[in-house]
Image: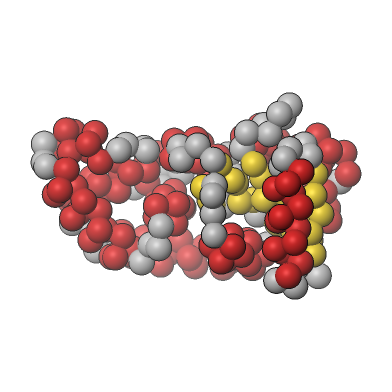
Amino acid sequence: MATVCVIDDDPAVRDSLTALLQAAGLEASTFASAEAFLAYGGIAHAGCALVDLRIPGMDGITLLMKLKASGSRLPVVVMTGHADVQIAVAAMKAGAIDFIEKPYSADALLTLVRRALNLAGQGEGMNAETVEITAKIATLTPRERDMLNHLVLGHANKIIAYELQISPRTVEIHRSNLMKKMGAGSLSHLVRMAISAGIGGIKGDSGKG
């Protein structure tokens, strides 16, 4: 069985995540730092990794960049307690497949972990997913596409309203419609889909629409 590697400097978090993963029938190994994970050779043993972005020493972004530079295809989900979409986007640009904000629900975390494990070594599946996402983006109106671009950049509703010269309430309506059209269950899910399709200049923006 593939191992889920948990990298977090908080021992209470490591213990709780280990208990959660094991209760779900998954194997878990924990590390207090990115350095400890790399020294252990965690890449060779892991099916996926859960990484706190704010770990001391080598932080989560640096670890992701190191993994990417080494050619590793290890699926990584990053955890952040700062509700900062821009940092999460930077993490995904560095190679993370998704992010989750603390505090998170057990079900949400397990859903991401299982997705990460399923993606391990399945490059063709990831390409098929990108094709599906691109097709969904093609159904968006120009205003919804503008909204998606702003959300990927981490802009708050009031900033989007100012930039698009519409009311905050109208922003909320467009945002709700956008989420439904894309089939996104959360902002992190929406951002991940947009990045995989190249929205926001991460993988080569396919146009401003």
Q: Is residue 171 visible?
A: yes
Q: Position of residue 8 (x, y in %)?
A: 71, 42
* Residue 176 occupies quadrant: bottom left
Image vertical order of residue 25 relative to residue 41, above or below: below
Quarter of the picture containing the N terminus is: bottom right
Left or right side of 150 for 89: right
Residue lying farthest to the left in this orientation: 166
Q: Where is residue 118 shown, x and y percent of the image? A: 64, 68
Instruction: Give the colour scheme of this rendering.
Output: secondary structure
Percent of width and height locating residue 40: 88, 44
Q: Residue shown at 80%/44% (left/top)?
A: 31
Q: Quadrant of residue 200?
A: top left
Work out whether residue 135 or residue 163 is closer to the camera in this orientation and state it: 163
| Horizontal relation, residue 124 to residue 2: left or right | left
Residue found at x 18% / y 55%: 173
Q: Residue furthest bottom?
A: 25
Callout count: 0
Of all residues shown, which one is farthest toward the top?
A: 57
Q: Is residue 123 visible?
A: no
In this view, 166 is above or below 100: above
Q: Is residue 99 above or below residue 118?
A: above
> In terms of depth relative to the viewer, which is nearer, 28 or 142?
28
Q: Is residue 99 shown left or right of residue 138? A: right
**Rendered image quadrant of residue 152:** top left
Residue at 23% across / 45% down in the picture? 146
Residue at coordinates 59% horizontally, 62% vertically from top-left? 106
Nearest to the observer: residue 13 or residue 3: 13
